[in-house]
Image (cartoon, grey):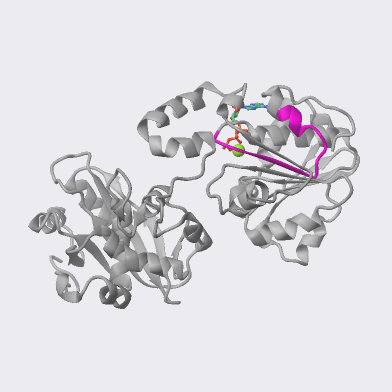
């Protein structure tokens, strides 16, 4: 919407050149470090410097504080571009030349009424737009409609079914939209530190690489019984009142290798009857280390019990906890069926919206979306997911035992108030 041309010429000209044309929608998606945020920040400041009285809003789905917003980035840009004399940086907004303003908001806080305050805004920049909900998109789209106004979106794609992807990359993208994919290789200022991280991740976790760095959707197994969408739809920033908290442990098969991965999960049953995943505390290390971590979680959350899979370890597991010299209520569980069979009733709870992740657990979520009705489709062992599944199996006994794990298949020792205390 610039009335005069301005220069943002430090990144790849073919991609960004396009973006300089006026257009109702501008969508930039791609992998990490491609310069999306830098580009829109620079374009916003350049626009505000030229177009007197410009009103712009930077939104994201959730903005708990201004630290979450693009404000700091814009302040850096103002200095970098030598425009300090034109802008007045205040606590929660930036005043722009000619009586304009740049404000920062979380869409989650908006209603159909409150969104009207944004009518008349000329630029709306939606950062991290992969997290924007359908409702937020539907509120924003008709609001930013002043003649010549523009809606900008920048995001790292997660799922084809995310609203922003459906909107711009589905079968009917809006007219008057400039939609471009951009990756690190398009960023002429891609810094050395990020290049090292990129090269490392390419080797260390090749299955995540295309998603993180090349803007591909997150990997999901074909026919998976968990989808990213379901996890996303039920995610919450906070949990309600909790009735029970348990720690789940899926210790590694061997008990000698100090680098084995042990799944440790903290889950709760809410007073509302829903399940809440509170923490993924998995770690690599010796048996002694997992035992200490599990006990630390038990104390931190004042949990009721530690649920431990003893399939592989037998007495070893009990001995491991005992060797720490601490007491805790232990529930031993023994798996008699395949992982995916144990997983199914829990995934059904997710599908009906009864399990919520309080925060994000990317490594565990990666494992969940690789469970299929026929087995686990990942190359790794799904220890993080299994620890969570054991917790939920304990918290939702009726649902899970009835469907997949008849009681007699369990060997569950419940201490009365704990052993070894
Ligand atoms: N115009 C620019 N001015 C200054 N630095 C830039 C510019 N463009 C790119 N860079 C460099 O590239 C890096 C990545 O840019 P940016 O943070 O905008 O990428 P992104 O695509 O938003 O990545 P992410 O997915 O991590 O949010 C920056 O940290 C900076 O080092
Ligand atoms: Mg960014």
Quadrant for the N terminus, please.
top right
Quadrant for the C terminus, please.
bottom left
Task: Please provide percent x and percent y for residue 352.
Answer: 46, 71
The image quadrant where one finds ligand 1 is top right
Q: Is residue 400 above or below residue 327?
A: below
Q: Is residue 20 above or below residue 67?
A: above
Magenta stretch?
A: 16-32
Task: Please provide percent x and percent y for residue 284.
Answer: 26, 43
Q: Nearer the viewer, residue 320 or 111?
A: 111
Q: On the rendered structure, is 122 left or right of 222?
A: right
Q: Nearer the viewer, residue 206 or 304?
A: 206
Residue at 55% from the left image edge and 50% from the top image edge: 160
Q: On the rendered structure, is 348 left or right of 71?
A: left
Quarter assignment of residue 319: bottom left
Residue at 61% from the left image edge and 22% from the top image edge: 189
Q: On the rendered structure, is 336 left or right of 100?
A: left
Instruction: Find the residue positioned furthest to the left.
Output: 315
Task: Please provide percent x and percent y for residue 159.
Answer: 53, 49
Q: Is residue 106 above or below residue 409?
A: above
The verdict on residue 336 being magenta is no
Quarter assignment of residue 275: bottom left
Task: Note whether residue 79 is visible.
Answer: no
Q: On the rendered structure, is 227 left or right of 172?
A: left
Residue at 46% from the left image edge and 53% from the top image edge: 360
Task: Note whether residue 382 is visible.
Answer: yes
């Amino acid at each position: 919407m610039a009335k005069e041309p301005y220069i943002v010429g430090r990144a790849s000209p073919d991609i960004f050149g396009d973006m300089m044309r006026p257009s109702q929608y501008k969508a930039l998606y791609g992998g990490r470090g491609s310069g999306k945020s830098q580009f829109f920040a620079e374009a916003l400041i350049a626009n505000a410097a030229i177009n007197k009285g410009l009103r712009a809003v930077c939104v994201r789905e959730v903005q708990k504080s201004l630290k979450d917003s693009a404000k700091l980035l814009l302040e850096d840009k103002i200095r970098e571009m030598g425009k300090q004399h034109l802008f007045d940086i205040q606590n929660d907004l930036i005043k722009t030349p000619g009586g304009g303003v740049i404000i920062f908001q979380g869409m989650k806080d908006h209603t159909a009424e409150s969104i009207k305050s944004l009518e008349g805004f000329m630029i709306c920049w939606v950062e991290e737009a992969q997290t924007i909900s359908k409702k937020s998109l539907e509120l924003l789209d008709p609001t930013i409609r002043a003649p010549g106004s523009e809606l900008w979106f920048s995001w790292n794609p997660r799922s084809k079914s995310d609203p922003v992807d459906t909107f711009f990359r589905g079968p009917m993208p809006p007219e008057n939209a400039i939609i471009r994919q951009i990756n690190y290789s398009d960023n002429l200022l891609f810094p050395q530190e990020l290049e090292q991280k990129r090269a490392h991740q390419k080797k260390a976790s090749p299955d995540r690489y295309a998603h993180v760095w090349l803007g591909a959707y997150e990997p999901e197994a074909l026919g998976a019984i968990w989808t990213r969408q379901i996890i996303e739809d039920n995610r919450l920033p906070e949990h309600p009142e909790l009735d029970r908290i348990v720690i789940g442990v899926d210790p590694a098969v061997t008990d000698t290798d100090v680098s084995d991965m042990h799944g440790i999960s903290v889950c709760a049953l809410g007073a509302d009857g829903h399940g809440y995943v509170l923490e993924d505390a998995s770690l690599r290390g010796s048996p002694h280390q997992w035992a200490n971590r599990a006990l630390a979680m038990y104390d931190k959350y004042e949990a009721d019990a530690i649920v431990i899979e003893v399939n592989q370890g037998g007495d070893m597991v009990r001995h491991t906890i005992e060797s720490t010299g601490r007491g805790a209520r232990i529930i031993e569980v023994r798996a008699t069926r395949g992982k995916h069979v144990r997983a199914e009733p829990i995934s059904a709870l997710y599908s009906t919206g009864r399990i919520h992740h309080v925060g994000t657990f990317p490594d565990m979520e990666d494992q969940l979306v690789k469970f299929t009705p026929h087995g686990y489709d990942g190359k790794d062992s799904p220890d993080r997911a299994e620890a969570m599944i054991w917790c939920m199996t304990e918290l939702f006994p009726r649902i899970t035992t009835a469907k997949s794990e008849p009681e007699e298949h369990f060997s569950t020792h419940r201490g009365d108030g704990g052993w070894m205390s």
